[in-house]
Amino acid sequence: MRFVPWQYIADWKCVACGYCCKLYSVVLGFPEWLRIVKTFGVAKTVADLNHLYIKRTNDGSCSFLCRFANTYYCSLQNMKPDACKLWPFKVLSEPKYGQAHQAAFNYGRKKLFIYADAMCSGLRYGRPTWEFNFLALREFADLALGTRKTQSKTTSDLAFASRFQVRRLRLP
């Protein structure tokens, strides 16, 4: 993994490519694990000595990754784990991945350090746009600090559209 400070990113939009769900394991907090187990059963999760995870399929993808045409979406959209809501961004209290000045983000009276995983195909590099800086990054910070639970700027419009289409197709 290579992390890039947010100030090198012009914009980010989820393109619903599914790479994040194919490449990474999702670590769950206990309340997230409990919601998933109550809804889908314990077989959709796995555990090791230190963590709880979403189970992966035989091809290595998250077991909740769905595909409609060439678009991927999460079937956990309404109970998506925090790790998924935040990806590809890491919101930290310390500059863990270097370049502190470029990663620094003023969030009220707090200084946070925000990095993006360079593997994400939805990143567009350059000077940050106003919308990215003042809307998307603030939403990521809110999500990371737990002051917000729902997403609008930090999820894919394509994922919602695909989910709606799949449901619509299944109706009689």
Image (cartoon, grey):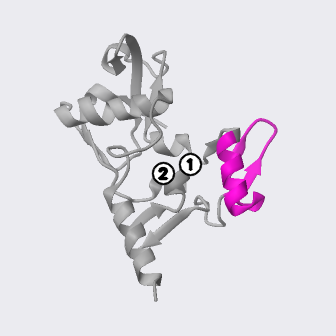
Number of other residues with Cα within 10 Å of mark 2, as a class: few under 14, some 14 to 19, many 20 or more: many
Counting every numbered tag in the picture gives 2
Q: Amino acid at mark 1?
A: Tyr
Q: Residue at x 48, y 15 (%)?
A: 94
Residue in front for this viewpoint, 53 or 165: 165
- Left of 97 or right of it: where is 158? left
- Is residue 170 shown above or below 19? below
The magenta stretch is: 31-55
Between 142 and 25, the one nearer to me in the picture: 142
Q: Amino acid at mark 2?
A: Cys
**Circles 1 and 2: CB atoms closer than 8 Å:** yes
What's the mark number on residue 24? 1
Provide the secondary structure element on which disc 1 rests. loop
Coordinates of residue 75 in the picture (x, y in percent): 52, 62
Residue 161 spot, x, y in % from top left: 34, 66
Identity of the residue furthest to the top in this view: 109
